[in-house]
């Protein structure tokens, strides 16, 4: 049984991290049973979650987890994709994970509106890790500084707010165009890329956070219906 080490459900989402949601959605796409464990990110390899225990080995990184599981399956989830579809999907995956992610991170951690929603969840998470109550505020403040710093290092966090939002909204526009009317990201059949697309679509549309990126995503009927359809089909429990 695969064991997924995660932060935990939050804001009506399967996990506070889209990368955890990505791994869990992939496992549900292929019908693979798994268990989840609330983990201490400080003790995780690379100090990141998710990690997954697969055949007794703890594997970090969401993409590495999916690639390893796929390598062991006789029928590949992406087996129906041609080279061009794979190339386009890989580019979108990188755009979501390496650009939109940091924009969403800034909107949750770097703005006062986002932080007012996220901080209580972070304090609760710290409590589950065994951090004493009187230290949680200080650690949350330090974590916020580090996360905002990551966004600045990546680059998107240095942009003025309006430019950051515009960058995120351009990605959403492209995503909606590529999605089209297909039931899945690349047409009639699901692929590993749907795990990433759903995780980010659900995060963007999360009703707990009020920001311009969520408002823009909500203007894309096909993106909204995609997120609703994926949730109904793969997240019934």
Image: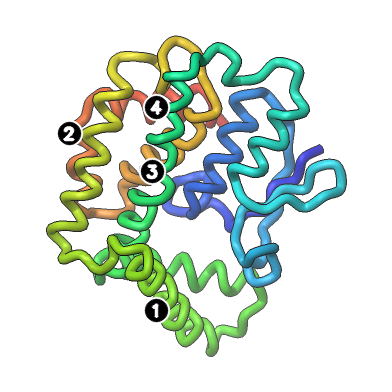
Q: In the drawing, what numbered circle is on residue 96? A: 3
Q: Quadrant of residue 237?
A: top right
Residue 105 x/y as whole percent: 37, 60
- Disc 2 vs disc 3: Cβ atoms closer than 8 Å? no
Which SS class for mark 4? Answer: helix
- Between label 4 and label 1, give the one nearer the viewer: 4
Comparing 213 with 57, the one in front is 57
Residue 229 x/y as whole percent: 41, 23
Left or right, 51 with respect to 171, comes to right
Label count reads: 4
Whichever of callouts 3 and 1 sits on the residue coming sooner in the sequence is 3
Q: In the drawing, what numbered circle is on residue 88? A: 4
- Disc 4 vs disc 2: Cβ atoms closer than 8 Å? no
- How crowded pointer 2 is (Cα within 10 Å; few <14, some 14-19, many 20+) is rated as few
Residue visible at 26% across and 40% down in the picture: 171
Residue visible at 82% across and 49% down in the picture: 57
Whichever of callouts 1 and 2 sits on the residue coming sooner in the sequence is 1
Residue visible at 50% across and 22% down in the picture: 233
- How crowded pointer 4 is (Cα within 10 Å; few <14, some 14-19, many 20+) is rated as few
Q: Provide the residue designation for mark 2.
A: 219
- Disc 3 vs disc 4: Cβ atoms closer than 8 Å? no
Residue visible at 67% across and 58% down in the picture: 38
Mark-to-mark CA distance, 4 and 1: 35 Å
- Between label 4 and label 2, give the one nearer the viewer: 4
- Disc 1 vs disc 2: Cβ atoms closer than 8 Å? no
Q: Provide the residue designation for mark 1.
A: 145
């Amino acid at each position: 049984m695969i064991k997924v080490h995660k932060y935990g459900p939050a804001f009506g989402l399967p996990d506070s991290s889209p990368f955890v949601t990505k791994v869990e959605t992939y496992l549900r796409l292929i019908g693979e049973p798994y268990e989840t464990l609330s983990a201490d990110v400080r003790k995780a390899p690379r100090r990141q979650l998710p990690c997954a225990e697969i055949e007794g080995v703890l594997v970090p990184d969401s993409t590495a987890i999916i690639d390893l599981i796929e390598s062991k399956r006789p029928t590949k989830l992406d087996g129906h994709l041609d080279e061009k579809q794979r190339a386009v999907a890989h580019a979108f995956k990188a755009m979501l994970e390496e650009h939109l992610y940091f924009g969403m991170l800034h909107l949750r951690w770097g703005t006062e509106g986002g932080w007012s929603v996220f901080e209580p969840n972070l304090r609760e998470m710290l409590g589950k890790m065994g951090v004493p109550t009187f230290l949680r505020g200080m650690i949350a403040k330090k974590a916020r500084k580090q996360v905002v710093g990551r966004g600045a290092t990546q680059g998107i966090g240095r942009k003025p707010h309006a430019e950051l939002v515009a960058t995120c909204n351009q990605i959403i526009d492209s995503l909606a165009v590529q999605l089209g009317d297909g039931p899945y990201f690349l047409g009639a059949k699901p692929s590993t890329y749907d795990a990433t697309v759903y995780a980010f679509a659900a995060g963007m549309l999360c009703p707990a956070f009020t920001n311009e990126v969520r408002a823009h995503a909500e203007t894309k009927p096909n993106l909204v219906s995609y997120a609703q359809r994926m949730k109904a089909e793969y997240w019934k429990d």
